[in-house]
Structure formats: C-alpha cells, structure tokens
Amino acid sequence: MGARVIELENVSYTYGGGELLSDVSVQLQPGSFHFLTGPSGAGKTTLLKLCYGALLPTSGRLSVFDQDISSLDRDQLAVLRRRVGVVHQDCQFLDHMTLAENVALPLMVSGRSESSEQDNLTELLSWVGLGARLEAHPPELSGGERQRAALARAVILSPDVVLADEPTGNVDWEMSQRLLRLLIELNRMGKTVLIATHDMSLIRAAKSQVQARVLRISQRKLHLAGADL
Amino acid sequence: MTRAEVSTLLRGDTRANRVVPPTGYTAHLTLFVAGAMAFLVVFALALALASGRIADRWASELAGAATLRINAPAEQLAAQTEAALTVLGQTPGVASARALSAEEQVALLSPWFGPDLPLDTLPIPQLIEITEGEPGMDVMGLRLRLGAEVPGAVLDDHTRWREPLVEAAMSLRRLGWISILLIGGATAAMITLAANASLAANAQIIEVLRLVGARDGFIAGAFVRRFTYRAFFGALVGTLLGMTGVLLLPEASDAGGFLTGVGFQGADWLLPIVIPILGAAVAFFATWAAARRKLKELS
C-alpha cells in the first residue's frame, strides 16, 4: 500500500449544471480515522461515492491506492472496489438471499470459495452480533441488524479502507455506539476509516476512543474542523 | 465476443445465478415467447422443406416428358398417329414415344366423365407420350416438322404449366425461410425487451453487486444464463409440440394433393433439433447485448 490510501487533488464535481463539490483536496493516510460532516445535502455522500468510483470527478485528480480513478476501466474499478468496503445508510441487500449469503456476496463476486471461508463468515457475523441470524432474510432484520450486516459485508474481503455513509442514521443511540465501537475496532486492525455523518454526538463520543480527523463540507468546499467539537 | 467469453458466460459461476431472483413475469414471458416461436418455426420449416421437395419433384418429373395430341377426323387418326410416331422415332433426343391405348385414355378422362365413357363414339384426340433422352430434343424443330407432316399434331412439352408450378413451389419455400428469419428476429426483439425489463426491475441488485466489486461480466452472466436456459427450455417444448403437430398431419397422397405433403420426411425430422439450440443462441446474444448496454447506462 502507498503512503496515501485515497488522495483528492482539486477535485470538483458537477451534476445537472450545478457544482456540488468545488476544488476539494484531501489525503487519507493508511490506518487513519476520519469523520466527514456537514449539513444534509452538503455533498458528503457525493464525496464518498467519488472515493469508491461510483462517481467520477468532473475535474481534478482522485487516486485510490495510487491509481488515478479516471484512468480505470469498469472492470478495474470493480476490482478496486473490493479493497474499499462501503456501508450505506440504506444498506441495500438482496432480499431473496439469506443474511449469510448477502454478507458472503463479495466472496462470490471475487471468485473466492464461500465454503472455505465459512469459518471466517461465521466468526465475522458473530463479531457484529449476528451469529444467530445467519438464515434470516434482510426484510426480517431490524435497522441495527441491517447496519451491522452491511458492515460485515463491507469488511469480509478485509479491505484496506472502510467508507460508511451515515451508518447510525437509522438506529438508536445504543446501537450507534455499538457500530462506532466496531468501526474503531476495524481502525485498530489497521483499516482506514471514513465515516460521513451529521451526528455530532457520534463524533464527540468517538474522540475519547480514537484519534480522528474531522472534515467538514460547507459551501461546496472541504475544511478541516475539530476546534469547534 | 470470443469463444472463451461465450463459454465463461454460459458456464460461469453457478452460485452467481442465485443473485437474480428466480421469479418474475419476464421468466414466463421468455418461456412463452421461445415456445410459441419454436412452434411456429417447426411449421415454417416443414412448409419450406415440403415446398422444396415439391418444386424438385415437379421439375424433375415433368422436365423429361412431353405429350403429342393428334386432332384429326376418325378416318385419318390412325394414319396421322403412325406418321407422328415415325417422325418421333427419327427425332434426336426422343428416347421413346408411345401412343396411349384406349383404356389409358379412358382412365385419364374418367375423373371428369366417369368410368363408362363411350370412347369410340366421341371425337377424342389420340395422345402420344414422349420421353426425352439426353441431351434433350429440339422442340421448335420437332414442331415445324410435325406441322408439315402431321397436320393434326399439337406438341405440349409441359413448359407452359410446369414453370408456374415450380415457381410457386419455390416461392413457398422462400416464404418459409423468410418466415423463419422473421420469427428469429421477433424472438430476439422480444427477449431483448424481456431482458431489459428484468435488468431494470433488478437495478437495485445490480447496484449492490457493483458496490461489492462485481465485474460487468459477472452481472451480465447471471442474466444471460437465466435467459438462455429459459429460451432453450421454452423452445424445446415448442419444438416438441410443433413436431407432434406435424406428425399428426395427413400423410402425402395423390388424392390429397399438395396439402397432404406438408411435413418432414426421413432425415428432415432431425432438423427441428437445432431449433432449441438456435433459440438459446438468439437469447444468449440478445441478453448479452441488452445487459452490456444497460450496465453502461447504469454506470
């Protein structure tokens, strides 16, 4: 892994004639922990999507693992995404498959045998507290269970980076603390973590447990925050 | 697309088939369309093959034969017949010439006038059956000589009515093949629509697969296999039903004429076997193209 996991240099993103992000520059170092905050609609999700190649910058340079993301073809982008675990607020599961199958989906698409990874899968689901729900289908899960399942799916390939978009948006305080502890634990394993959230209490709670950098988006620009927390 | 890519898409990772929900109206639509189209193709194929056989038979059966009709007063009929046979015997390219007997002429006329035809009381012309040899006779030269030596002779080499019949049979054969092509095109169009509908209905699944690092080939493969197998089984059932229908058609007979000859004969029965395979191939390429297009749109 290079010195920077993700690097944005003067990145702008325009959609429908309006500029959502302007001249954004930031570097995520390996093993670092970041919060991305800002009001709703500020562009947090857009920035996260840029980081895993779901969107491409209108201008500027964005590199992930030292690869310019604009120069990658669709298959190369797919392979790159296996090194970036993503947790969405709405989770997105395949409802006709069981929880275990959903969490194992990254193994399937990357051609790895699910049977040989069965122990890891069981262990991972136990780690997120879903060891007893392997055969449940996503519609049967609570909001908190869905978020933890999404986190398990995001990390099953042991990615170098975990991007989480409002991971605590649909859960109560207790569950949000549990998810935060899991993300901090991942960071202690050496993963780079970037959490987009507008929940300032989550950021305050994290400060006592992990050295986190807080980035704030406002007026389409990215600023380093922290003093006001 | 290379053969390896086709093989990978068809075999693929069977676990990947699970990512697309197994039900949905597109499944029934694909099965029904493939089955109905295969059923129609069987009949179009039977029509094309039967038309070809009939065209060939008419062309070959009638090409080497001609008829000479002697219209003369009763007292001159025998003399003119004898003269005509002499001329024909001297004509190069005539393999044989034979005057039909009274019984044979009655047999020819009986379908119209009944079996009790009093031939001897009617002014019926004498018919002479001519069989051509190789390399064939000079029809124009023969007509001129007969005109001079046998005034009551009229030569009919069957060209006048053979050519339109053969042309009609050939046209039917062409129509049969064009129908097969059109059915293939319509099948591809309908399967493309079904595949597009399925891809659109499963957009969220595609988004999830993308999110976890699935390549386009993996996603497209899951849909391609689903539609290819559905089309194959639908076409197989349609083909079997179509072949049963053809089997139940009346067998060819002289009394039945053209309509009773529509069907498969001998090795022709093996040809419908390729229909399910072609149906699957059409579905494979239609779905593959639709999936690639849709995946580009969704990116």
Image: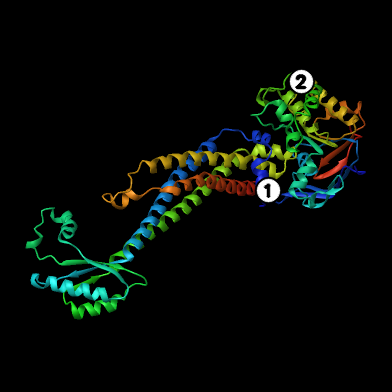
**Host chain of mark 2:** A
Q: Amino acid at mark 2?
A: Gly
User: Which SS class for mark 2?
Assistant: loop
Q: CA distance from mark 1 to mark 2?
A: 39 Å
Q: Which mark is residue A125?
A: none
**In the picture provided, is A201 more to the left or to the right than B261?**
right
In the image shown, does B295 or B176 lie closer to the viewer? B176
Q: Is residue B192 visible?
A: no
Evaluate whether label 1 is on the same chain as label 2: no
In the image shown, does B63 or A111 lie closer to the viewer? B63
Residue labelled with disc 1: B5
Q: Estimate the x, y position of residue A156 in percent, counting from the top left.
A: 79, 31
Residue labelled with disc 2: A131
Image vertical order of residue B10 relative to residue B23, above or below: below
Q: Quadrant of residue B161?
A: bottom left
User: Which SS class for mark 1?
Assistant: helix
**Do the numbered discs 1 and 2 sit on residues whose CB atoms are within 8 Å?**
no
